[in-house]
Amino acid sequence: MFARFRRQTIVMSYSSNGFPDLEQLTILLRKYKRNVEVYTRPHRYHFGTHVAVKRASVDEYLIVGR
C-alpha cells in the first residue's frame, strides 16, 4: 500500500493494540516517506466491552507520511 501511494500524503489511524506495532509500521512507512509524524491520543473502547476486558484502554495514533 505504501509503495502504491508513495507520491501522495499517507494518513492512517492506528491502535496501540494493532499488529504490526507502531515502531514496525513507521519503519515501513519511512521507506517511502521522508517525513513521518505520529500523533497520540488515549482511547477507551466502549462497544461490546465490560469490566473484565483487558486492552480496552489503548492509545490511538494518527500517522502522517509526507
Image: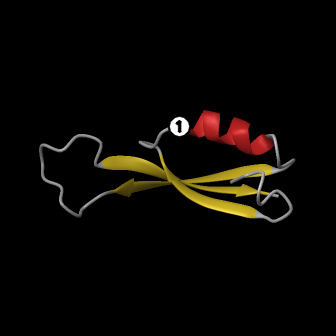
How many discs mark residues in the rendered view?
A: 1
**Residue visible at 61% across and 59% down in the picture:** 12
x then y, percent, for residue 27: 71, 36
Quadrant of residue 1 within the rendered picture: bottom right
Left/right of residue 32 with respect to residue 46 in the rendered view: right
x then y, percent, for residue 13: 55, 59
**Residue visible at 78% across and 51% down in the picture:** 3
Quadrant of residue 4 within the rendered picture: bottom right
Above-or-below relation of 51 to 22: below
Q: Quadrant of the C terminus?
A: bottom right
Q: Secondary structure at mark 1?
A: loop
- The disc labelled 1 sits on which kind of residue? Pro
Q: Residue furthest front?
A: 4
Left/right of residue 42 with respect to residue 7 in the rendered view: left
x then y, percent, for residue 30: 79, 42
Left/right of residue 52 with respect to residue 41 in the rendered view: left
Above-or-below relation of 2 to 55: below
Q: Nearer the viewer, residue 15 or 32?
A: 32
Residue under pointer 1? 20
Above-or-below relation of 12 to 54: below
**Residue visible at 62% across and 34% down in the picture:** 23
Q: Nearer the viewer, residue 2 or 61?
A: 2
- Badge 1 crowding class, 10 Å Cα cut-off, few under 14, some 14 to 19, many 20 or more, is few
x then y, percent, for residue 22: 58, 39
Q: How is the image coloured?
A: secondary structure
